[in-house]
Every structure is written in C-alpha cells, then in structure tokens.
Amino acid sequence: MVDVDVLVTGAGPVGLTAASELSRRGVSCRVVDRLPARLPYARAVGVQPRTLEIWDRMGMIREALEAAVPLKGQLLFVNGEQGPRIDLELPPEVPYGFAALPQYETERLLEQLLRRWGGHVERDTELVSFEQDSDEVRIVLSPPSGGTEELTARYLMGCDGAHSAVRKGLGLSFEGAALPEEYMLGDVEVDWDLPAGYGIRSSRTVDGHTDDLLVCIPLPGDHRYRMSMAAPPELSRTGQEDADGVTHGLSGEQGPAPGVEDIQAVLDRLSPRPTTASSLRWSSVFRISHRIVDRYGRGRVFVAGDAAHIHPPTGAQGMNTGVQDAFNLAWKLAAAVRGHAGAGLLESYGAERRPIGEEVVARTLRHARRGIQADPDDPATTMLREAQLLIGYRGSPVVGPDGSAHDGPAPGDRAPDCGGLVYALGTFPVRLFTLLREREHTLLLYADHAEQLDPFDEVAAAAARAAHGLLNACAVLGPKLDPPALRLPTVHDSLDEFRRAYGARGGEAVLVRPDGYLGLRTVPADGPELPAHLERLFGT
C-alpha cells in the first residue's frame, strides 16, 4: 500500500504549481523542500501573459493581478544615447499583459492556493534516495527531526532545481555548458525620473560589441528595481564551482555578497540618469548555464522546471516555462492516479514539453549572445513568442489531427479567450476563460441553427462517461438562436466573438484540455472522432 499518491520535491513556483493542481483534483500529495524557509530573493521576476492565463485556470488570477505590477516595455540606452523604446503590446483579445512579481511573492501566492486545497510545504526536508518498480516509488527523506523517513508513492515529481537530486537519481543526462560571465543581482531603490513600468537596458559598446551592461526590471514599490550587471573581480566565484558540475544560479553563502556601493559603481558608469541607489534588500552573485535533460522522466518519476532545463534569463522564460511543465504534467498524473489515463498519456508529458524546453534553451542562449534582434521574425510574432502565447502541441500523440477544415486554432494550439458569452440566467456577458476556470476537460458544442442542437445532450453525457467524469460540457449558441430545451449548460455567443475566434462551424465539438490547449475539433459533434479521442486519453 502506498503512503501518498505523488511526492513533489521542491517548493518553488514549479513544485507549488504541481502540488496545487494535484491537490485541487483530490490527489494525495506531499511537497517537500530542503530549505527551512522561503528565500527572500526577487530571482524570477517576469511573469508572462501565458502564465497569468494558467493562474486564471488555477483560480489565482485576482491575487496575482493585485500583487504584480505591469511591465510596459523597455527603454534602451547605448553609450549614453537613448535608442528606440520597446512597448510590450499584444493583440486586444489577449486578456493579460506582461507583469513583474518577485519570486517570493509568486511562491507566497501559490502556497496560499495550496493551503486552500488542504496542502502545505514540509520544509527542511530533503530527498535522500529513491528507487522504483512498475507499481511504486520507494523514497527515503531526511526530515527536520533528524534520522530518515521511508515512504512509498505512486509517482515522484522532481521540481528541485538546477542541482536536482531527482534528476541525478534517474541518471538523466544534462547536456550543455556554463557561460563564462559572472553577474550580480541587487534589489534596490533609485531616485531617477525614468517612466515607471519600463525595464532599463543600458550598455556600453566597443567596436560594436557589448563591453558593459546594466539591466533593471521594475518591482512593486516606489522606484524599486531588480538590477543585473557584471560582477567585479573581487566578487568572482571562479574556483568555487558547484560540486555536481552544474554552475547555475545564486551564490548563496559562497563568497561575499555585493554591497550597495558595488551597484552604485555600475550606476555611475551606465545609468541613463544620475541617480543614487538605496534600500538594498538583497544581493547575490550568479552564474548561468544552458542545459537540458535527455528525457523528462522515466517510469514513475518525472522532472520539471530547472530540474529539466536551465538557460539564460533573457526574456524571463525560465520560471514561466517550468510552471507550464508542472501544469501539463499535473492533470495527466491526476488521471493516472485515478486509473483513468489512457496508454501513452503520461509519456505525452515529455513528448509535448521537451521540444518546448529545447526551443527555449536555444532561443534564450541566442538572445543572450546576440540580443533579441537575432530572431528574424516580425516584431508582433516575436512579442507573442516572448509572451509564450505561441507554444503549442500540434502533432502530440494525445491531440487530434490538425485537419484543414477550420479557419481558427487547430488541435494542439492554445485555446484563445473571447468575450460576449451570456448565460440564460445572466444579465451580463462573461469571458470564455471565466467559463473554463478551475475545470478539467471542457467540451464546447457550437450551434448556429436549431437542428444542430438535437444530439448535444447525448453527446455531452456520453463524453462525460467516457472521461470518467473528468469533463464539463457547455453549448455555445449563435447570437440568433433562441434558448433551447437542453439539459446541459448553455451560453449565447452574443457578440459572435466565439465563432470568429475559433472559426467555429455549426454542429462542431471543440474539446479544451485542462491546461488550456485544444485537444480536438470535430464536425459533426456526434461523429466517431470524439469517443475515439476520449478513449485514447482516458482508456476504456
């Protein structure tokens, strides 16, 4: 008999996302972290629009929007001269913009969400070892009381960072290398008059090559920024390489931490305005590597986030990519724990997420070396990619065929939001993302003529049975249709936004996965494609 369904190691944003989603689905889950307390460092700061969409699905969006500050764009300065301003603008149908939020605040909100579902973080607890067979994972922990604790779990999820014990225990390769540069971070206030909400990138170039660089990201507070810059020789970590050979992250207690005078020296060289740094909250030296595992799991053990991929922080992709790793795996693990995972569902985690990790590692490394201008795409496409809104899983073994009969997003693509949906009992419209919030698979049945409605109730009931209850259904009615006598919930597409956003056809079934990607599109809704797809996902 197992002691817990899933053990999650690591209580950063990735592990907390996994634990929250598992707990919300009623999966027994323990999350352990070797640190005695949450670190007070603004490490990962940038929050991408796609992550905000995920937090919406998780039921945490209000708290996130109240805690974060908008990230409006970036001001560029080269050799003291201001260059073109970059405004972080997205199409109006995208519901959330770019944001800045210190990592410790992200972790606080996710811990708060975990507690809502009855979970908590077991701190000062370290994974010692594990072994697995086809039925369970046998784990040894080192608890704060001393000694060891032995337990068995159905699954183990390693979200324990760049030096992951889970990755090492699985024997996964972690190919890549360290960048030679050393940097320092500092969380300070400044008194310049530059516009709020804009990041600052100020560089000095010699013969066309960057010789000195200052990057400042706004944080909640008055004139507060997380600043990144080259570390001076006296703060170097050279010769203090990490024991496992993976040189990545903050220096911790290794060597002296930068003082406000070190940051001020860089500001004196590179600040676009004369300014004084004050109120230093924390600082550290850090190194960067680029690495990715050969696979995202083996058997009943998986890795996610920095345990699977590390890369330069350009574009604020790391934490956001890890959160999507965790969300992708959590709903699949929950189905497996309940005994309702079709053949290949858990394997699809690596099939879907590793190509994303590869692309992010390559792109951030390219941007670190040559700047974002190294990408040939037009600015609008580049912005959508940085926002992580172009991530998709076309060709995944657990999404339907692409096909060419529809004009909107294909199976594997992100499910777009839209407005103007009105419930029969509602006096105001809601957005599609509101309808999808905190749900499993959602089956949207679209009709623009009355005769298309006839099979909808039976299609919805059969789909719920095939998904073992892990599916909600809703009819979306064209604006000219009168309210029908259906048993399933209905909304009116009062502004025709759903049809336009999805290129929806009358009588179509659109299946939205728990992570907000399209799993299937098929017409007619009562054809054989939907039952066959649900059998692949959930088994018989």
Image (spheres, grey):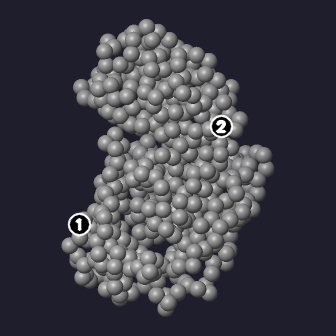
Q: Residue furthest bottom?
A: 234
Identity of the residue drawn at 44% across and 80% down: 207
Q: What is the quadrant of the C terminus in the image?
A: top right
Q: Relative to residue 475, is residue 470 drawn left or right?
A: right
Q: Relative to residue 371, is residue 154 drawn left or right?
A: right
Frontmost residue, 305 versus 465:
305
- Amino acid carrying label 2: it is Pro
Quarter assignment of residue 226: bottom left
Which residue is tagged 1?
Answer: 195
User: Spatial distance from mark 2 to mark 1, Cα to Cα?
Assistant: 47 Å
Which residue is tagged 2?
Answer: 397
Frontmost residue, 509 versus 314:
314
- Amino acid carrying label 1: it is Pro
Could you tell me residue 418's position as x and y percent? 35, 34
Q: What is the quadrant of the N terminus in the image?
A: top right
Identity of the residue drawn at 37% across and 61% down: 101
Identity of the residue drawn at 57% across and 55% down: 359
Frontmost residue, 381 versus 287:
381
Q: Residue furthest right?
A: 133
User: Considering only vertical position in the picture, is 210 above or below 354?
Assistant: below
Looking at the image, is mark 2 or mark 1 earlier in the sequence? Answer: 1
